[in-house]
Amino acid sequence: MEETVKFDCRHFLGDRPCAYGGECAGCEHYSPMGRRLLLIKLAAAGDVLRATSVLPPLKRKYPDSHITWVADASAVPLVAGNPYVDRTLPMGFASWLVLSRERFDETICLDKEPRAAALAGSVESRSRLGFGLTEWGTVRPLNEGARYDFELGLSNEKKFYENQLSYPEIFAAIADVDYAGEPYTLYVPERSVRRANEWAGSVGRASPLIGMNVGAGDVFANKAWTSEGFAALASRVETELGGTAVVLSGPDDRDRASAVLKLAPQAVDAGTHELLDFAALVGVMDAIVTGDTLAMHIAIALGVPVVVTLGPTVGQEIAFYGPGRKVASRIDCAPCYRRECDLEPSCMDLIDVEDVFGALRDVLEEE
């Protein structure tokens, strides 16, 4: 049996026929796994998507490699379906049980957090890159490429002012691959694309459609632009561009969405959607305006022109591969990465609609 069943084939499923449906013996689609790579990037969702930029150079370095990616369950859809990834697993005990019985040629941990580093150290692997754990349970760099990112996290001076590398460049250094400016990619299933196109067709409003992503998570203070700013932008989209402002939001952003819609009743509410349906909606926009958040990364991945408003986070780490503009607050204390802030006016209060609208016009003309 073991002479005819190809256990090392990347198409082998074990409990049912593979996609080609035939017997293993003599199968012309037999594709041995080759060099087995384990990639660990658990969170946050936007960073997981941005980390897919490392896949093309990895495949260029190891053309016949088999890549397994471990991510938090909420971020798995952002990697699943990627043509460079052979298998995607959600972080958790069940996945660890499987991984603990496997052997990898190389494990690459892109996360500077203990649970990811612990997973990287717990699997059998001939070599490890990225981050691991010390005997005290603290994170440490495993290679020279990871050391730069490690030091970046320990020095505000280096992170906020000295560093000029984008995160795709930093990820490539961690993975020890040559980065040639490849964009990160997102696979959006056809059913999600179809729903987004049907929604856009049902709106019956003038183009261009300008997505306004009003939320930005709750990790950092003041990461989202103001409701008043978005409302003023919606008015100018209608009167000066002859287009339609579309309010994009996640389930946790509905209060902000309601506030914007109350101030700008001419805007269209896109509602809330599952992750890939949301991504498809971003994909049908002519441009989007957003904070430094998942919607920004989705737009970049799908080639949608994007304007990003920046307050507490760092702009130089963001790489655009198409039309894109950064509008940074002029406040002296930004960036800061603060979790709480009571300054009035805040950094985002000081971002003027004139600057955002000008950037929006630029990316639309550049498209």
Image (cartoon, grey):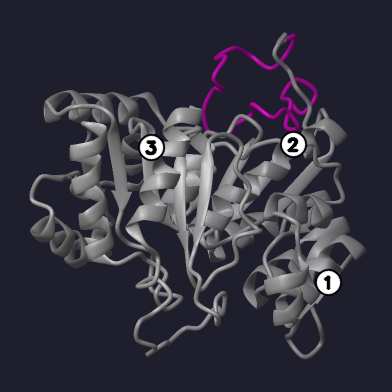
Distance (Cα) linking label 1 and label 2: 24 Å
Residue located at (23% from left, 45% from top): 236
Mark 2: secondary structure: strand
Let me know if residue 5 is in the magenta part: yes
Residue 160: x percent and y percent? 67, 73
Identify the image quadrant of residue 183. top right
Q: Amino acid at mark 3?
A: Ala
Please indicate, yes or no, whether residue 42 appears anywhere in the rendered image: yes
The residue singled out by tag 3 in the image is 287
What amino acid type is highlighted by mark number 1?
A: Pro
Q: Is residue 77 visible?
A: no
Q: Quadrant of residue 352?
A: bottom left
Query: Residue 296 in the image: x percent, y percent?
Result: 46, 49
Task: Tell me which numbered mark, 1 or 2, is placed earlier along the sequence.
Answer: 2
Q: Quadrant of residue 189?
A: top left
Q: Which residues are magenta?
A: 1-26
Are the residues tagged 3 and 2 within 8 Å (C-beta)?
no
Q: Position of residue 355 (x, y in %)?
A: 41, 54
Q: Which residue is mark 2?
A: 66
Q: Is residue 236 above or below residue 188?
A: below
Which residue is located at x 45 percent, y 43 percent?
306
- Location of residue 24 with respect to 255 vertically, above or below: above
Foreground mark, 3 or 2, reads 3
**In the rendered image of this protein, does residue 336 appear above or below residue 273?**
below
Q: CA distance from mark 1 to mark 3?
A: 38 Å
Front residue of 186 and 324: 324
Type of the residue with mark 2? His
Numbered tag placed on residue 141 in the rendering: 1
Mark found first going from the N terminus, 1 or 3: 1
Q: Earlier in the sequence, mark 3 or mark 2?
A: 2
State whether the magenta stretch is mostly helix, strand or loop: loop
